[in-house]
């Protein structure tokens, strides 16, 4: 952000005042070192795509981001924290809503994507509008149909809270709270949420077994789904048109909104299948309530279009048994521990 929250003259007086009282500075206690936090990288995962080189992870930064994530006062009506659209019970997605709810009973254009394993993303949002976690964090804070706030009001609120003031100074080594510090703190929290403890993960480690139906569903997945949702992250992070008709009320054409290219019309990011059993609703606009409706789309309702992904030209053919077993395999991708992990819950 380029907006200044102090005048140049105030800054000059502040610096001059520091130089005029060197003895007072010497009496201040030095800021203690931060506790370094390592990103959790599961053994089966590739190296993360996202680097925190400009935002070094620390336990203090993570905890500051967690507090911001759950704070409704960052929104214009004091009712809509980040966590209202990214609920832990729903794998940090919008739980049982089609599109996310914003301030003053507004609705967003899309269903909020899940916020775990973000460090393996190369871009963010359904249309890839943002290339960094910090930039992505900025969008909902000021969006008129999301949190609807201004940075001045947010910073006034944070500066009035001594705990916040001290935390920002400790983490970012700066006397004032700046918008980019808010973004970075949120990025430290959301970028550290990792999900890799489902029954599938335990099966791959050899500590649990699949039922015959889950094993059969796993084989169906490999044939019918893995091209776009490859293991172990269960997404290739590409943008594809999967044959959904345009909702005439939303008129959302996906990635073309960002690139302006006709060849990107109706393309949306391929979501992960991890925790999909608990992260309803589904698709970019949450039009489907159940996974069965999703499979019905691929089996019977793929709409032809110039940009339709070639893999879906004839839809996906599944028998009833294959359909049922695939659903059981998808349920085995649920990481129940994520839903109750105290590291990610609302701070006490």
Image (tube, helix red, strand yellow):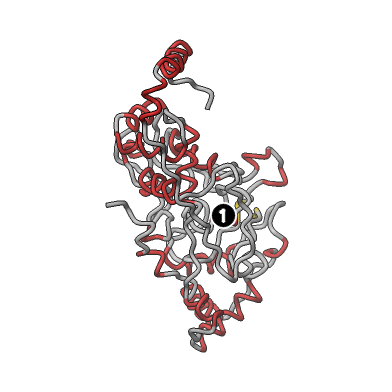
* For residue 234, side relative to residue 179 (left or right): right
Residue 307, placed above or below residue 129: below
Q: Position of residue 166 (x, y in %)?
A: 35, 36
Instruction: Return the residue nearer the eye: 45 or 283.
Output: 45
* For residue 13, side relative to residue 72 (left or right): right
Q: Position of residue 154 (x, y in %)?
A: 37, 31
Residue 312 placement: quadrant:
bottom right
Q: Please, which residue is most extreme toward the top here?
A: 9
Q: Secondary structure at mark 1?
A: helix
Q: Position of residue 144 (x, y in %)?
A: 43, 33
Residue 1, placed above or below residue 302: above
Tell me which residue sits at (39%, 37%) in the image. Answer: 147
* Residue, disc 1: 119
Q: Please, which residue is most extreme toward the bottom here?
A: 212
Instruction: Return the residue nearer the eye: 197 or 64.
Output: 64
Instruction: Return the residue nearer the eye: 193 or 279.
Output: 193
Q: Please, which residue is most extreme toward the left here?
A: 348
Determine crowd level at label 1: few under 14, some 14-19, many 20+ residues with C-alpha closer than 10 A: many
Residue 203, placed above or below residue 295: below
Tell me which residue sits at (41%, 38%) in the image. Answer: 31
Residue 40, placed above or below residue 83: below
Q: Position of residue 5 (x, y in %)?
A: 43, 20
Tell me which residue sits at (66%, 55%) in the image. Answer: 238
């Amino acid at each position: 952000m380029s907006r200044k929250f102090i005048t140049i003259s105030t800054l000059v007086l502040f610096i001059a005042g520091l130089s005029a009282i060197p003895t007072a500075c010497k009496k201040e206690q030095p800021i203690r070192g931060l506790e370094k936090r390592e990103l959790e990288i599961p053994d089966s995962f590739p190296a993360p795509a996202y680097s925190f080189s400009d935002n070094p992870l620390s336990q203090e930064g993570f905890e500051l981001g967690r507090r911001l994530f759950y704070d409704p006062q960052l929104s214009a009506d004091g009712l809509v924290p980040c966590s209202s659209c990214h609920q832990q019970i729903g794998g940090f997605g919008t739980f049982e809503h089609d599109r996310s709810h914003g301030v003053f009973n507004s609705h967003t254009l899309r269903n909020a994507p899940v916020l775990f394993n973000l460090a393996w993303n190369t871009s963010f949002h359904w249309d890839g509008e943002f290339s960094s976690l910090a930039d992505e964090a900025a969008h909902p804070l000021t969006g008129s149909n999301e949190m609807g706030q201004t940075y001045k009001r947010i910073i006034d609120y944070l500066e009035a809270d001594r705990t916040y003031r001290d935390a920002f100074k400790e983490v970012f080594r700066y006397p004032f709270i700046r918008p980019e510090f808010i973004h970075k703190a949120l990025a430290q929290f959301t970028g550290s949420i990792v999900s890799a403890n489902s029954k599938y993960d335990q099966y791959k480690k050899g500590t649990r077994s699949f039922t015959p139906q889950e094993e059969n569903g796993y084989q169906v997945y490999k044939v019918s789904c893995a091209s776009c949702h490859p293991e172990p992250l269960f997404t290739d992070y590409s943008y594809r048109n999967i044959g959904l008709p345009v909702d005439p009320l939303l008129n959302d054409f996906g990635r073309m909104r960002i690139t302006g290219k006709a060849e990107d019309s109706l393309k949306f990011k391929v979501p992960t299948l991890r925790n999909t059993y608990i992260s309803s609703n589904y698709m970019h606009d949450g039009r489907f309530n159940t996974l069965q409706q999703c499979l019905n789309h691929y089996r019977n309702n793929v709409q032809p279009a110039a940009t339709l992904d070639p893999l879906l030209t004839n839809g996906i053919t599944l028998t009833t048994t294959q359909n049922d077993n695939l659903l059981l395999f998808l349920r085995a991708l649920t990481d129940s521990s994520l839903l109750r992990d105290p590291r990610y819950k609302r701070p006490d």
